[in-house]
Each structure stands twice: as C-alpha cells, then as structure tokens.
Amino acid sequence: MKYIVGIIQPDRLDEVMRLLGEKEIHLVTVSSVLGRGRQKGISAVYRSHKEAGSLLRKTKLEIAVNEPFVQSAVDAIMTGAKTGNIGDGKVFVFDLTECRRIRTGETGEAAIG
C-alpha cells in the first residue's frame, strides 16, 4: 500500500482527475493549500490576477492505493499537471503501513478498495 501526495497548480485539477478516473482511481482527497517551492513564492499571475506574498495557491491531492495502482496514479498526476512551467508541482510517494475502514473495520488492502 502507498500514500501518494501531489501538489499541483489549481487549474490542472480537472485534467488530473480525468486521467485518474481513466485509470480507475476514484478515491481522492483534494485540498486547497498555500505553499512555495524553488520560486520562493515570487508573485505570479493566476487567472488574470496577481498573487502577492510569499505563498502561492496550490491544490493538494492525497490518494491511498494498493501496489498495482501506484504507477498509474503517479503517471496520471505527472501527465495532467505538467505545463512545462516553473511551479508545476511535486509528487510524493510514501509507504502506507496501515489503513482501516471505519464503517466495516476492514484493514489493509481491503480497506483501500
């Protein structure tokens, strides 16, 4: 089991979600977050207005998957989020040691689905 975290540009979310759906990956948590990377939060224009300050708007995806879906999920995020510009984002893959489904009490791979 793996836990995948993707930090992407907000305007790339629809494309990433479309590609994840094509790979039969539907269990995704999405959050609006603020952050900065190598560009150190340098002001940028986003949807016709200038983002000020040291933190930029990003979208965070969190996905728990079983081993057969890891590469498909990473590929979908990488492909859907890529514009070729600075600030496209990052993908992190962590080992997931435990997962429990609250409703049924299932654990491990069965709990992910």
Image: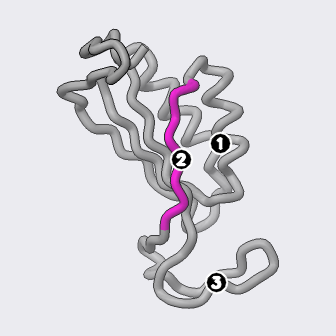
Classify mark 1: helix, strand or loop: helix
Distance from the alpha carbon under mark 3 to that under mark 2: 21 Å
Q: Residue at x 64, y 81 (%)?
A: 44
Q: Are marks 3 and 2 in contact (CB under 8 Å)?
A: no
Q: Earlier in the sequence, mark 3 or mark 1?
A: 3
Q: Is residue 98 magenta?
A: no
Relative to 48, is 41 on the left or the right?
left
Q: Which residues are magenta?
A: 26-33
Q: Where, by quadrant of the figure, is residue 107 drawn?
A: top left
Q: Earlier in the sequence, mark 3 or mark 2?
A: 2
Name the front one of labels 3 and 1. Answer: 3
Q: Residue at x 67, y 21 (%)?
A: 22
Question: Mark 1 — residue?
Answer: 80
Q: Residue at x 45, y 25 (%)?
A: 71
On the image, the x and y values in percent for residue 111 come to 34, 16
Distance from the alpha carbon under mark 3 to that under mark 1: 23 Å
Relative to 65, is 27 on the left or the right?
right
Screen quadrant of the N terminus: top left
On the image, the x and y values in percent for residue 78 come to 55, 42
Decide: is 33 above or below 25.
below
Name the front one of labels 3 and 2. Answer: 2
